[in-house]
Amino acid sequence: DIQNAYLTAPIKEKYYIIASESFGFAREFWGRPAKVVRALYGLPVAGASFRSHLAKHLRSLGYKPSKADPDVHLRPAVKENGDKYYQIILAYVDDLLCCGIDPASQMAVIGLEFTLKDGSVEEPKMYLGADIEKVQIHESDSPLKTRWAMSSTNYTKKAIYEVERELASADFGFTYLPKGVKTPMASDYRPEQDPTPELNHKQQNYYQGLIGVLRWICELGRLDIIMPVSLMSRYLAQAREGHLNQVFHMFAYLKHHDRYKLVFDDTIPVYDESRFHKCDWSEFYPDAQELLPPDMPEPLGKSVVMTCFCDADHAGCKETRRSHTGVLIFVNRAPILWFSKRQATVETSTFGSEIVALRIAVEMIEGLRYKLRMFGVKIDGPCDTFCDNESVVKNTTRPESPIKKKHNSIAYHKARESIAAGIIRIAKEDGKTNIADILTKLLKGPTLRDLSSRCMW
């Protein structure tokens, strides 16, 4: 954590102040203009000036910003055994996260230019509200190994404390969170059919704040509440009393199920190759190939594989009959990217909703593959993609399968051309084991815990 970060950066813009006693000037300077030469806190250009100053210094140390994310800085390095890899620095305003064989030495060099807060140079324990820790994984066919993990435990506890404190001091119909809650939302509750009275202005603002907190908890890895939070986020403009009660229900669930975390396991998953249909696509998409970034850095280090689970809840919204898409993408066995959102159009068939979900998944896969490559990561083979609709699997993996619903032709050809280009390969996953179900459906307790245990630890 860089101390007084903005004040370290010079500014190009012309700003001045009128000298006075409050600025510490001697009396003879009072009333005279004083030129501002540093990025004072509160200036419109302060954030941009500091970021530019930090990036310039990192470039002088041999780091280059990635074009996929300019706040991720890469520098080639060599291990003692001769293997090449990238030292990485992630910058979030004045917080730096160093990744490498010897991150302490990276920080020490940066500390020559910037003053780092005492006690802040250490292995990460928290980053942007997430708890960071090391965990030990034991598998029957491999020795004990230590990996990094991320959770929202402390952030969630603080949020629950504030909610319970508000319940005790305000009139919401009850004074404490419900007990014995097994799911984030009652499985028979439909927010679009809620007939309860609308919230007043004060309650509405409070509801919006709670949804914001829950959204960040989702960003920190609580995949099991993403679907309910997505549903309740539709009513930010005007919520009802029943909606607010269900939000309290979510916090009660988080209070009694607070041990979930995401483990960044680098183990490469192995799937039965017979599940994937192989064929020749040259006559249908003769020029299909994955477009590699021409300016991507040389891939260094070990290669990774990608896996994707996608699903759609056909006509899940009782009010509009729109379907809900869910996508979960892994890099090796680490869940990296997730998506849960109502589709933009009404699909009249399960096939239509599932093929739209697959098209969204393909676009997310392409975006992540680009980003990984621009970070210098080598990707091994296509992304193994699993969905639980047999018609979608057959239509996209067999060249001879025609498209009958012409309005789905864009999604249909997008998926098939991606297979021909080697970006993805598709296989069927049983609905009972499709992890993406937690992102599209309100599941019962045992099913939710079973699927959640496959992606959270």
Image (tube, grey):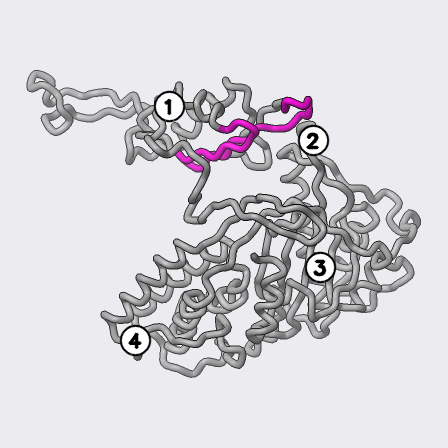
Q: Earlier in the sequence, mark 4 or mark 2?
A: 4
- Amino acid carrying label 1: it is Phe
- Amino acid carrying label 2: it is Pro
Res. 367 visible in picture: no
Callout 4: helix, strand or loop?
Answer: loop
- Amino acid carrying label 4: it is Phe
Q: CA distance from mark 3 to mark 2?
A: 28 Å
Q: What x and y, as percent, mark residue 431?
A: 71, 70
- Find disc 3 in the rendering and name its residue: 358
- In magenta segment, residue 77: no
Q: CA distance from mark 4 to mark 2?
A: 56 Å
Q: Earlier in the sequence, mark 3 or mark 1?
A: 1
Residue at 49%, 57% in the rendered image: 218
- Find disc 1 in the rendering and name its residue: 114
The residue positioned farthest toward the bottom in the image shown: 195
Residue at 26%, 75% in the rendered image: 171
- In magenta segment, residue 80: yes
Q: Nearer the viewer, mark 3 or mark 4?
A: 4
- Find disc 4 in the rendering and name its residue: 172
Q: In this rendering, is residue 332 above or below 47?
A: below
- Find disc 2 in the rendering and name its residue: 299
Q: Which residues are magenta?
A: 79-103
Which image quarter: residue 240?
bottom left
Residue at 62%, 34% in the rendered image: 375
Callout 2: helix, strand or loop?
Answer: loop
Q: Nearer the viewer, mark 3 or mark 2?
A: 2
Q: CA distance from mark 3 to mark 4?
A: 42 Å
Q: CA distance from mark 4 to mark 1?
A: 49 Å
Q: CA distance from mark 1 to mark 2?
A: 31 Å
Q: Earlier in the sequence, mark 4 or mark 1?
A: 1
Residue at 46%, 58% in the rendered image: 215
